[in-house]
Amino acid sequence: MFLGTLVGGFILSLRHSIAIAFVVYQAIYFFNPEKRWWGNLIPDISYSFFIVLFMAILVFANSSVTKQNRINDVPPLKWAIAVMVLYSIAYFYAIAPEYHYLFMVYFIKLIIIMCLAFKLISTVKDFSYVLKGYIFAAWYVSFYVFQIGRNSGNRVEGVGLVDSPDANGLAAAIAPALVLSLYYYWTTKKYIWKAAYALAGVFIANAIVLINSRGAFLAVAASIAFFMFYMYTSSFQRKNQKKMAVFITLAGLSGALYLADDDFINRITGITEEADKAEEQESGATRMVFWKAAWEMTKDHPYGNGYRGFNYFSPFYIPDGIDTGGNKSRSVHSTWFETLTEVGYLGFSFFIMMLWSAWQHLKKVKSYLRNNQLVDEYFKIIALQGSLIAFVIAMTFLNRMRAEILYWLIMFSAAAYNVYVLKKYAGQPNSQSNT
């Protein structure tokens, strides 16, 4: 499967669409061959390096097309670059410069890759390829989780990704793909593809249940609720849209009841634990103490402290009597406070502006599509908004400031604005719309 994806992706990139090169990159990221049981069966080389090099070659070889995709015209990517620049500047005052340097280089590479990917996406069809590529890749790792099963008590461990080796990070990475699977299941006409997207959705949901991530559960619930709200209440409708919304809701609830086991239910109900348990044992509530400590720390260090600045100074800010497993040097467990403590108020402001810009430009795309009576494309953007909601919620409980998937979603919003609005995609009014 891995080699077929690799070879097939290279061929399709040359013969069909250069954007498929980024789909191959997405697949490599989720396949993560170095950490899989089958990894020793294939050559031990840096597959991601070669696909990024291939992406760069395609960008320059097709410059007559790719130069029309101007990064300067899409604010979400510009804000991402600004966050990266501030993170690089933080190297000069980071509390652990040698470690900060390593992650600064990774961050710079990530932003460069996102810029290359943006350049490769020139049409709406290209844009759909990368969204579907994300679903495929998320399906694979979910299938892998299914194969491995719970191997660490009531959790799944050792199946993570390059930048998120723990189970919660993996759950956050696949959670945004579920609402996209739902969208394509709904709008796809061919039954074989409907079955494929339904299967992908089932495996992704099952992986989140097996991983037992409360943050990912909240993320999926919010993103699906957001999409279903629009699907049911919007005056912009496909044929039989409300009936399909009712069917999907009932089917989804039935599926959730079937997949959820006692371990998952007990884990999720732990969301409501009382805050005073934080003084007895480390729990989800303990994170509130960490967040308060991070806020106090930022007051004393307004420019941040670089990579894992919170970990270094946390013993001075976490109150006595809080059980931190015998070690007060802890992670803050929130992207918001991670950003504050690593790049300070200015970096946090840039980070917020990046997310806000992505959301606002998706709203502009929605408005354009509605005005042009493109109902299917309109709901695609709503699904993408749902994906962004999912990751933002998941990262609230994790340190994911430099997460691959976060910047994929930022790049997706920039690409959507480019191919739909800047290039004035007209398309054809959907024959099934009933406005």
Image (cartoon, rainbow, N blue to C red):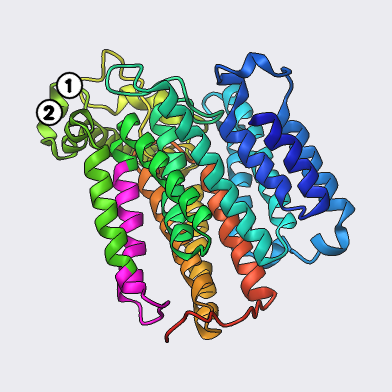
Q: Which residue is most to the front?
A: 191
- Foreground residue, 255 or 106? 255
Q: What range is drawn magenta here?
A: 217-243
**Residue 348 on image: x %, y %:** 46, 49
The answer to whether 116 appears left or right of 136 in the picture is right
Q: Quadrant of residue 93?
A: top right
**Residue 108 on image: x %, y %:** 67, 40
Identity of the residue drawn at 69% across and 55% down: 118
The answer to whether 284 appears left or right of 401 in the picture is left
Name the residue tied to disc 2: 277
Disc 1, SS: loop
Asked whether 87 falls inside the magenta stretch, the response is no
Name the residue tied to disc 1: 281
Identity of the residue drawn at 87% across and 52% down: 60
State if disc 2 and disc 1 touch (CB < 8 Å). Answer: yes
Give the CA distance from mark 1 to mark 2. Answer: 6 Å
Asked whether 219 falls inside the magenta stretch, the response is yes
Disc ID at residue 58: none
Q: Which three-letter amino acid code belongs to the residue tagged 1?
A: Gln
On-image quarter of the C terminus: bottom left
**Residue 86 on image: x %, y %:** 59, 45
